[in-house]
């Protein structure tokens, strides 16, 4: 089976009513847990994929662009915007955009590039990326990538099943982490840490707390966005640099996985799924059968004449 290869220039477009993030709409500061957002970004070009993309620039690639490897992630800075008019912008947008992620899980294991199996569109010409989400809803394959190219790769049933398993495992891990760090006690702790860390600095400029800065120094929306983002920042950093994240950026030492070295851009490692991948490969791909031969089979010699 032949499927289109993912390239750096392909664009991911999020399905708005499947991109469900937590939101706070000033002047009401009570969180709304499941608000649809629109989002879009290129797979690995410009500011996207710098830390978490898996391009293969040393390989010759048909139809232009650079082909990507399995596990490539758009990562941080994916533009988001809530799609519920006339609501104002979500005050949590700075944190959502900073910690965004959109991961491509399907790879052709008979065609391995330097950064891993070649990433392909799981529906032949369309791929479904697993996108980030808020704590009230698990990440969903809501990132639509339409691959307008002529570069294809051979794919087995094992590749398709393994990619789907990767996606399910990543979604469950991310959902569990989101739920953990959004619990009332944990979020309150993050707010206290932010107040304690920022308090001395704010006093130097004439404010005793983040709330005082918001009330006296900033407008309604900007103030609420600043306050909520600052309060969320300690827990956001704790999640990224502690357990890590399977979607978006996290360092390589984290249990969930991330970049091998944060200072070495583009060395993203898809950790935690080797066992799943190997088990599916063994189940569907017989090691004694070449799934995608590099050349046409040699015809059998005619039997010798008696």
Image: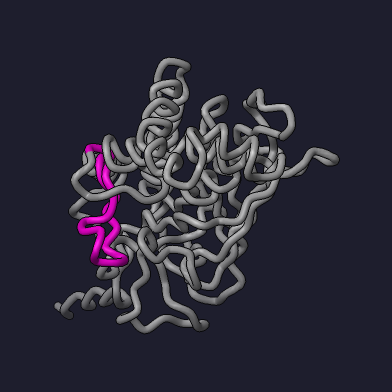
Relative placement, left or right, of 203 versus 80 is left
Residue ranking furthest to the right: 86
Q: Quadrant of the C terminus?
A: bottom left
What residue is rendered at 37% in x and 70% in y? 55
Relative placement, left or right, of 101 versus 146 is left
What residue is rendered at 69% in x and 38% in y? 36
What residue is rendered at 51% in x and 44% in y? 95
x%, y% of residue 107? 38, 56
What residue is rendered at 34% in x and 42% in y? 240
Q: Nearer the viewer, residue 26 or 139?
A: 26
173 up-or-down from 101: above or below: above
Q: Is residue 76 magenta?
A: no
141 up-or-down from 293: above or below: above
Relative placement, left or right, of 35 versus 293 is right
Q: Nearer the viewer, residue 12 or 265?
A: 265
Q: Nearer the viewer, residue 188 or 143?
A: 188
Tell me the colour scheme of the image: one colour
Q: Nearer the viewer, residue 84 or 111?
A: 84
The answer to whether any part of residue 77 appears in the image is yes
Q: Quadrant of residue 190?
A: top left
Q: Quadrant of residue 10?
A: bottom right
x%, y% of residue 268? 29, 58
x%, y% of residue 153? 43, 67
x%, y% of residue 197? 35, 36
Q: Which residues are magenta?
A: 255-272
The answer to whether any part of residue 172 appears in the image is no
Q: Is residue 270 magenta?
A: yes
Q: Main secondary structure of the magenta part?
A: loop
């Amino acid at each position: 089976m032949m499927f289109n290869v993912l390239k750096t220039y392909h664009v991911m477009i999020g399905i708005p009513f499947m991109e469900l993030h937590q939101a706070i709409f000033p002047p009401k500061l009570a969180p709304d847990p499941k608000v649809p957002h629109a989002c879009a970004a290129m797979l690995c070009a410009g500011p996207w994929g710098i830390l978490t993309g898996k391009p293969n620039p040393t390989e010759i690639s048909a139809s232009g662009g650079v082909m990507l490897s399995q596990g490539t992630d758009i990562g941080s800075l994916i533009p988001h915007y809530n799609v519920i008019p006339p609501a104002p912008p979500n005050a949590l947008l700075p944190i959502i955009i900073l910690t965004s992620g959109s991961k491509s899980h399907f790879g052709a294991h008979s065609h391995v590039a330097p950064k891993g199996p070649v990433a392909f569109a799981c529906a032949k010409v369309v791929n479904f990326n697993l996108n980030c989400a808020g704590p009230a809803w698990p990440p969903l394959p809501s990132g639509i990538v339409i691959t307008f190219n002529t570069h294809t790769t051979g794919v087995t049933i094992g590749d398709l099943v393994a990619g789907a398993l990767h996606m399910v495992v990543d979604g469950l891990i991310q959902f569990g982490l989101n739920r953990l760090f959004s619990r009332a006690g944990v979020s309150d702790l993050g707010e206290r840490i932010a107040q304690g860390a920022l308090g001395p600095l704010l006093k130097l400029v004439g404010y005793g707390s983040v709330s005082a800065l918001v009330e006296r120094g900033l407008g309604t929306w900007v103030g609420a966005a600043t306050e909520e983002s600052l309060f969320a920042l300690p827990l956001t950093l704790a999640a990224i640099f502690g357990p890590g994240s399977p979607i978006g950026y996290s360092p390589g030492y984290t249990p969930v996985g991330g970049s091998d070295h944060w200072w070495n851009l583009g060395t993203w490692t898809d950790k935690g799924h080797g066992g799943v991948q190997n088990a599916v490969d063994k189940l569907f791909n017989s090691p004694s059968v070449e799934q995608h031969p590099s050349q046409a089979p040699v015809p059998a010699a005619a039997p010798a004449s008696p």
